[in-house]
Amino acid sequence: QVRLVESGGGNVQAGESLNLSCAASGGRSFLYYTVGWFRQAPGKEREFVASVSDNARRTRYSDTVKGRFTASRDDDKNMVYLQMNNLKSEDTAIYFCAVGGKPLEVNTVAFWGQGIQVAVSS
């Protein structure tokens, strides 16, 4: 069992930045998982945001965040990050850290964080 705890969310104005962090503990070595982020806005399905492969050589982003968000991982610290720049009101959602197989999709996630709120006002 891998436990994931997100931090760094909050309320910001459009155009501002936030950096989400996710601390992983327990279970199988963190090194072997693809890690990433999903989000869920009110009344909508959970959607993929970004992922980083298990060797950190490949990142993948949804079209809606490409060029604005950067996902990264630090395997020595068992941490996952999501740097979010130029935030828009449509980025408002609960953000979930996730680890699983590749490609990282809702149905390949092995473990989820509890989620953290990001609210962007225009």
Image (cartoon, rainbow, N blue to C red):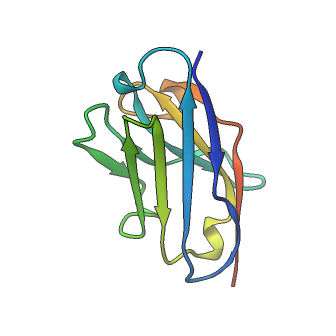
Quarter assignment of residue 56: top left
25 or 63: which is nearer to us? 25
Estimate the x, y position of residue 86 in percent, counting from the top left.
50, 78
Quarter assignment of residue 32: top left
- Left or right of residue 97: residue 56: left
Estimate the x, y position of residue 52 in percent, counting from the top left.
35, 42
71 or 48: which is nearer to us? 71
Q: Is residue 117 above or below residue 104?
A: below
Q: Residue at x 42, y 25 (%)?
A: 30
90 or 94: which is nearer to us? 94
Q: Is residue 121 above or below residue 63?
A: below
Q: Residue at x 61, y 66 (%)?
A: 91
Estimate the x, y position of residue 121 in percent, counting from the top left.
72, 79
Quarter assignment of residue 19: bottom right
Quadrant of the rendering where the N terminus is positioned: top right
Estimate the x, y position of residue 9 in percent, counting from the top left.
67, 59
